[in-house]
Amino acid sequence: MWRKFLVLSICSVSIITIFSLLYLKYGKANKETYLPEFKFIDINKKWLNSGSLQNYKGYCIVLFNTDCEICQAEEEIISRAKNIYTENCFILLSPEPDSIIDAFISKHKLISDNVFILSAPLDVIMQTFDGKSAPFVFIYNKNKKLIYKANTSPLDVFMKCWDAGNKK
């Protein structure tokens, strides 16, 4: 009996260690980077820039594409998270036409005061945010310091990153 417990304990510790190391290597921002200056137009044809984003505890920027299955899953998470993390800001950025984005937003119920849907050409998005492809998630703390970036991120990582990043 104790052998099973020992084996399970060793396996658990090994798995946790592997995931922790992967997170440190690939998920966590390696150098101090801050929210870049940007000016994009939102789906309501209003300009939004990085300077106008004030008084949020955290910023989650998601590069997405409506055809991407992972992006759709992330938008479902954000649809729930926007009501839980009301002091945080979600910025969804896509190079797709407004009509496609509008349908996507309606389907996923993403309209909220703390959710901004922006559109820009893909090359401009990639130059501004250094994303490799959609989906890509950037999380910044209240000081607009990058604390996490990855191809995808579950809801619990959002909150852990914001909590950890805002204590610094």
Image: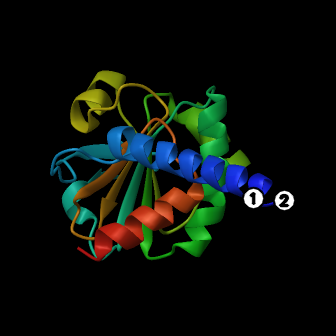
Say the numbered circle drawn on residue 110: none
Tell me which residue sits at (23%, 46%) in the image. 39
Callout 1–callout 2 Cβ contact below 8 Å: yes
Residue indicated by mark 1: 5
Tell me which residue sits at (40%, 72%) in the image. 163
Q: Label 1 crowding class (10 Å Cα cut-off): few <14, some 14-19, many 20+?
A: few
Image quadrant for the N terminus? bottom right
The residues bearing labels 1 and 2 have C-alpha atoms spaced at a distance of 7 Å
Pick the front one: 35 or 124 = 35
Q: How are the colours assigned in the image? A: rainbow
Question: From this viewpoint, which residue is outermost toward the right?
Answer: 1
| Residue 121 percent location from the top left of the image | 34, 26
| Residue 65 percent location from the top left of the image | 54, 30
Pick the front one: 67 or 22 = 22
| Residue 34 percent location from the top left of the image | 18, 53
Counting the numbered discs, the total is 2
Pick the front one: 26 or 69 = 26
Determine whether 57 is above or below 4 in the image: below
Helix, strand or loop under label 2: loop
Residue 166 visible in rendering: yes
Tell me which residue sits at (44%, 76%) in the image. 87
Say the numbered circle drawn on residue 1: 2
Determine whether 43 is above or below 136 in the image: below
